[in-house]
């Protein structure tokens, strides 16, 4: 009996250390309007059971994730179906459907990145504004051990977005804010060529606008040390749009 219990304990330890566990990710929409979150698995990880879905204001939805897993999450806004084709004015994924089916968001978009049971079995996560902004968003853990701090971008960056970076809707309102890299496609803003990070690509006046509005968010290619968070102990996650 003791040998059986010891063997069972070893099996559990192996599965925990190898990251063979499941996590739950809950999406909550605190925005006043319906949004359409998208999900994307990275590094050849399996796509989740829902790669895109409708989420009404004040509604929540939970998805299961089998570790190890790495991916991105975002929200599409002002979506509609015309002639049978589903499209969104921000962060669309070009499928013509509510589901994204492995397609990334059209930038600019506020991204949440989560790596579950990554290096050493530790989770890594952040709010990413390097590729621009469309909605306020936060990511927080439930359970887990270690620092496990929440990362949040609660500010509406669109309200202070420079004219050269603005994405406007048909009604003239600012729907999203491009990164300088997307807007100008120049090495000093994209950290390419002679401006490769870390030493040759300092923050710019444009990236500082994002950082000032959302200090916890990852807003520049050299910003990962201050804006990437870790958690261990198999936590669950809550992603809140318009926190």
Image (cartoon, helix red, strand yellow):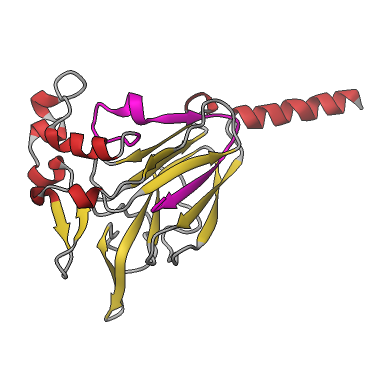
Write down the region rendered in magenta: 216-243
Q: Residue at x 34, y 24 (%)?
A: 225
Left/right placement of residue 191 relative to residue 106 reads left
Q: Residue at x 29, y 67 (%)?
A: 78
Q: Is residue 130 magenta?
A: no
Above-or-below relation of 184 to 203: below
- Residue 175, quarter of the rendered image: bottom left
Left/right placement of residue 173 relative to residue 153 reads left
Q: Residue at x 61, y 27 (%)?
A: 17
Is residue 72 at all visible to an observer of this figure? Answer: no
The answer to which of 173 and 7 lies nearer the viewer is 173
Q: Residue at x 15, y 35 (%)?
A: 190
Can you give x and y, in whole percent of width and height, for residue 52 in the image? 41, 61
- Residue 206, quarter of the rendered image: top left
Above-or-below relation of 184 to 215: below
Can you give x and y, in whole percent of width and height, for residue 98 in the image? 38, 67
Can you give x and y, in whole percent of width and height, for residue 15 in the image? 65, 32
């Amino acid at each position: 009996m003791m040998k059986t219990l010891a063997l069972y304990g070893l099996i559990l330890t192996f599965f925990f250390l190898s990251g063979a566990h499941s996590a739950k990710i809950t999406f909550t929409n605190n925005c006043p309007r319906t949004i359409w979150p998208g999900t994307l698995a990275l590094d050849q990880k399996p796509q989740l059971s829902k790669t895109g879905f409708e989420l009404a204001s004040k509604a929540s939805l939970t998805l299961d994730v089998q570790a190890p897993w790495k991916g991105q999450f975002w929200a599409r806004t002002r979506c509609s179906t015309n002639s049978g084709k589903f499209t969104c004015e921000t962060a669309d994924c070009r499928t013509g459907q509510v589901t994204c089916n492995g397609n990334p968001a059209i930038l600019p978009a506020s991204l949440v990145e989560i790596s579950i049971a990554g290096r050493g079995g530790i989770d890594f996560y952040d709010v990413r504004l390097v590729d621009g902004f469309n909605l306020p968003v936060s990511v927080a853990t439930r359970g887990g051990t270690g620092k496990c701090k929440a990362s949040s971008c609660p500010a509406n960056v669109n309200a202070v977005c420079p004219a050269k970076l603005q994405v406007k809707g048909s009604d003239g309102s600012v729907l999203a804010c491009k990164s300088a890299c997307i807007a100008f496609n120049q090495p000093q803003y994209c950290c390419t060529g002679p401006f490769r990070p870390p030493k040759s690509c300092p923050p710019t006046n444009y990236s500082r606008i994002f950082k000032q509005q959302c200090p916890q968010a990852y807003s520049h290619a050299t910003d990962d040390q201050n804006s990437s968070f870790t958690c261990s102990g198999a936590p669950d996650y809550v992603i809140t749009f318009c926190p």
